[in-house]
Every structure is written in C-alpha cells, then in structure tokens.
Amino acid sequence: MMKEHSTKLTLLTCLSDGQFHSGEKLGELLGISRAAVSKHIKGIQCWGIDIFRVQGRGYQLADPLEMLSQSSLVAASDDASVDVIPIIDSTNQYLLDRTSELSSGSVCLAEYQAAGRGRRGREWVSPFGANLYLSMYWKLDAGMAAAMGLSLVVGVAVVEALEKIGVQGIKLKWPNDLYYNDKKLAGILVELSGQAGGAAHIVIGLGLNMSMKSEVEGIDQPWTSLTEVCNGEVPNRTELAQALICAWHTALTDYELNGMSGFVPRWNRLDNFLGRNVRLLIGPRELEGEVMGINEQGAVLLKTHNGLESHIGGEISLRKND
Ligand code: ATP
Ligand code: BTN
C-alpha cells in the first residue's frame, strides 16, 4: 500500500515542474512499464488531480502543484512533532491513534484524505494538494468540560491569522465553520479521547479550502475557496500552515490560562450571523431568533420571542433564515 503511494508521489514530484513527461521516460525513471505508469496516473487522478495526456508528448499537470514542505514546518513548541503524511485516511484520526505518545502542539498535515470527516460522521471532501488539512493534538488539563470552547477559540485564531497576512472578509459560523460571502470556506472538528475526570486528550482539525476546483463532488451546501477570497492570489500553503500552527499554539495556551472571556468580543466581531435571523436545529427541535453573539461558555445567544436564550452542545446546527 505504502509502496504504491510512494510510486505515485514520485510521479507527481516529476510532474510538478509543469512540463510534459513521456510515459516511457517516467517508466524508466521508476523502473516500471509504461502500462504501470498509466495505471498510477489513473490512481493519481482519483485523488482529485487533473492530468492531461497528449499523444507524442506525454503527461502534464493541468494546474501547478506545490506540495507541503515538511522541512519548512516547525512545531510551535520544542517537544511537539510535525508529521506531513501526504496520503492519509484522516489527520484527526492519525493523532487520535497516537495521543499517548504526543506532546501538546504536535501536528499532522496531509495532501489528501481518503476518509476526511466533519461533525457527526459527515464526509469532508479532501482532494490532493488543493486545500489545507491540518490537525493538532492538545492535552487539556481542565478536562472535557473545557473542550466545547475549543472550536470557537481555534476559529477566531484562524481568521485573525488570515487577516494578519492580508486575507480579509472571512467570518465565523457558530460553532465550527469559517464563512465567506455566506459560503463555507473551512470547517473545524474537535475530537477527544479523554477519560472522564482526568485531563482530556483533544485533537483539533481544520479543513481549509484553498484552490479547490468547482467540479468537485460531494458537498451539499454552498462553499468557496481562498481563490475567491484572494482573487486568485492564494497564500503559500506551507507558510499559511506555519502561521496557523503558531496562532493555534498561542490561542490554546491563552484559553488554558484565561478561559473564553477574551475570545468573546473577538468572536463577536467576526460572527457571520450577528444581528441576523437564524434557525437553530436542536435534534428534532427547531428554534428561530436573532443571533446576539456568544457567551463565556461558548454558547450561542439567541433573541427569541421568549427572550434571550443560550444554547450549547455538539448536536446543534445553525442555519440562516433570511
Ligand atoms: P453543522 O455542523 O452546523 O450541521 P455543516 O452542515 O457544515 O454544519 P459539518 O458536519 O460541520 O456540517 O460539515 C460537514 C459538511 O460540510 C458536509 O456535509 C458537506 O456538506 C460540507 N463539506 C464537506 N467537504 C467540504 C469542503 N471541502 N468544503 C466545504 N464544505 C464541505
Ligand atoms: C466540519 O465542518 O464539520 C469540520 C470539518 C473538519 C475537516 C478537517 S480536515 C483535517 C481534519 N481531519 C479530518 O478528518 N477532519 C478535519
């Protein structure tokens, strides 16, 4: 399995110069037949990469591809690790499987996820090289109760880090999404493997669309990529990942020391639905009201016909209602 991936990754590295490469030359380079090259190219296309084949010239990538550079990425603290695993099932799962060996701040990044996931077992569409798939492990001494606030804290940190590098106009949707022009740009998934009572072992994952093609299948809601936000001038993925790793480290340390209070105004400034009418889907129940921001527990505040209500919990979805 791994061997098969490494052949495909070597092929991709050759093609990433953007030039044509003949099947024959590629085969020679890898010590495999032209038919085997063709088979591997088909496999690469299944990861979501477009490759042309022109008779007499060979294969060429349809779009430029710049892979993540593990050597340029450094952990935000000394004893944490950075693992770039190009082909993975899920970066969150990778860290969840290793919590006993990890230090807070350890991260995993991938180019492609075969089983990327969102909340409640939904699929996260994860084509190769087009987006950022980043997860971080954090040991939360405050335990599970403090975990709910994490997706909010991390969301604020991501938007502020993007603003710092000149990417403006990104908003937050409670509790775990980044939005741009009312479309989903990114999602954050917080998962935990904690014993009740003790410290919680938390994995925080971000899927951020950077230059995903509009033809992609499997997303059943309006979505967008940084290409739209930045008018085509998308930041370098490795540099952005590094900025996010640092920003998360700072935000998580701050949250552990000081709790949510400092994040409440920072969240409210960025809330996509502040002052807007929404529906909250709470299991089978549905509630309507105007978003008034969040409170210090990380609950969403809603002005309803019954007055001001706060709602929190993993089973709640917010939908626009205008
Ligand atoms: P909520 O959690 O409030 O119900 P949601 O509908 O966004 O919101 P999530 O579980 O947070 O649900 O996210 C998973 C959903 O995100 C998928 O069902 C799909 O509609 C969408 N999705 C999957 N991959 C992507 C992607 N790469 N970019 C944008 N949206 C995606
Ligand atoms: C959501 O909107 O429901 C959250 C989506 C989170 C996707 C990221 S991609 C990196 C990490 N690995 C996963 O399998 N999921 C998260």
Image (cartoon, rainbow, N blue to C red):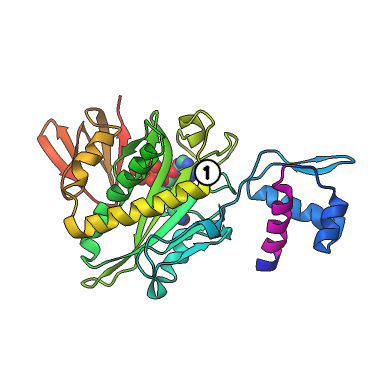
Out of 74 and 32, give the one closest to the viewer: 74
Q: What element carries label 1?
A: loop
Residue 44, compared with residue 308, is above or below; it is below
Q: Where is residue 217 in the image (x, y as percent from the top left)?
A: 57, 40
Q: Where is residue 179 in the image (x, y as percent from the top left)?
A: 38, 35
Name the residue beneath numbered marker 1.
236
Looking at the figure, which quarter contains the C terminus?
A: top left
Q: In this view, does 113 lie to the left or right of 288?
A: right
Q: Where is residue 56 in the image (x, y as percent from the top left)?
A: 90, 41
Check residue 273 for magenta coloring: no
Q: Which residue sits at x=30%, y=44%?
A: 156
Check residue 11 for magenta coloring: yes
Looking at the figure, which quarter contains the N terminus?
A: bottom right
Q: In this view, does 250 lie to the left or right of 145?
A: right
Q: In the orientation shown, which residue stands out farthest toward the left?
A: 307
Q: Position of residue 7 (x, y in %)?
A: 72, 61
